[in-house]
Amino acid sequence: MRAESSATAAPRIAVTSERDRPGLGALQAALGVVAFSLTFPATAWGLEGFGPWSLVAARSVLAAVIAGAALTAVRARLPARRHWPGLAVVAAGVVLGFPLLTTLALQTSTTAHAAVVVGLLPLTTALISALRVGSRPSRTFWAAALAGAAAVLAFTAQQSGGALTTADLYLFAALLVCAAGYTEGGRLARVMPGWQVIGWALVLCLPLTVPVAALALAHEPVRLTAHSVTGLLWVAAGSQFLGLVVWYRGMAAIGIPKASQLQLAQPLLTLVWSVLLLGEHLTVAAPLTAAAVLVCIAVTQRARG
């Protein structure tokens, strides 16, 4: 009992100091958004040489190895027993559900079309946060959030033609599980270091991801190229671990609803990377949507709950 008390007391001190610096928290959340914006293009690269199950399982295992090494290096104590259910939600939503569902979607969908998930994610995260942790943002906040989400949806719908496909079903399911994982992770990041939230969630999945990776790699074709290896390494180290580390720290510092609204810029960043890395064409609607989204982000950051 004494060990559990000491394990939770020290992280609370560290987290409180982060919350006293909202500017730093916003910067950390923004860095997380930049890391996440590369996920879809990197996944598309990874699918050039790996099957979807191999890519998802391998990225989770590699990220868990990085996380396990970091946890061992600082001699992190096991989380208190009461935190494990929340970590299981993070693992199911962020470590397993979102990567698998979006990877399956990207087999038949473009990165521009898949960006609709990210366009809706801030609003969904804010909604689930309000239900789960009792946050009550202001009406101005909700109006700006809805306007930003509508702008992103209109843009991505125009890009994809607005047709509902099997890939869309994967994307909408990914949206829900990821929002739940973000909300629970943001809540846990208030009582333990944010990087340990995703670190322990990744380690928690190892008994499942290791055998799945072994089976998938044995049955799906593997073709190692510069693109496929780079894509795998990025989604493992950048998206699955480092991006989530700064993201959860940012959410703990500035609050889940406000941090989630920074993700309104993520679809547009993803489209830029898609042009630069995948050769996709960007329409003239992009800068107009970007301006609208930036205005919405500014309003949500000033709105008080």
Image (tube, helix red, strand yellow):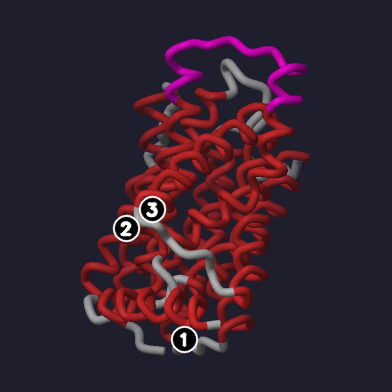
User: Is residue 224 a member of the stretch shown in magenta?
Assistant: yes
How would you rate the neighbour count of disc 2 (Cα within 10 Å): few for under 14, some for 14-19, many for 20 or more? many
In terms of depth relative to the viewer, which is nearer, 2 or 281?
2
How would you rate the neighbour count of disc 1 (Cα within 10 Å): few for under 14, some for 14-19, many for 20 or more? some
Callout 1: helix, strand or loop? loop
The answer to whether residue 117 shows anywhere in this view is: no
Between the C-alphas of marks 3 and 1, the distance is: 21 Å
Compared to residue 244, the image places residue 271 above or below, namely: above
In terms of depth relative to the viewer, which is nearer, 96 or 278?
96
Callout 2: helix, strand or loop? helix
- Residue at (21, 71) in percent of width and height: 23
Q: Which of the two labelled residues, at mark 3 and mark 1, occupies the earlier sequence position?
A: 3
Question: Mark on residue 30?
Answer: 2
Q: Main secondary structure of the magenta part?
A: helix
Q: Position of residue 283 (x, y in %)?
A: 41, 36
- Residue at (52, 43) in percent of width and height: 64
Task: Give the residue at mark 1.
Answer: 137
Compared to residue 185, the image places residue 170 above or below, namely: above
Could you tell me the amino acid type at mark 2?
Answer: Ala
Between the C-alphas of marks 1 and 2, the distance is: 20 Å
How would you rate the neighbour count of disc 3 (Cα within 10 Å): few for under 14, some for 14-19, many for 20 or more? many
- Residue at (38, 60) in percent of width and height: 293
Q: Position of residue 164 (x, y in %)?
A: 74, 44
Could you tell me the amino acid type at mark 1?
Answer: Pro
Callout 3: helix, strand or loop? helix
The answer to whether residue 130 shows anywhere in this view is: yes
- For the record, the magenta segment spans 214-230
Q: Position of residue 282 (x, y in %)?
A: 41, 33
Q: Residue furthest front?
A: 2
Question: Mark on residue 33?
Answer: 3
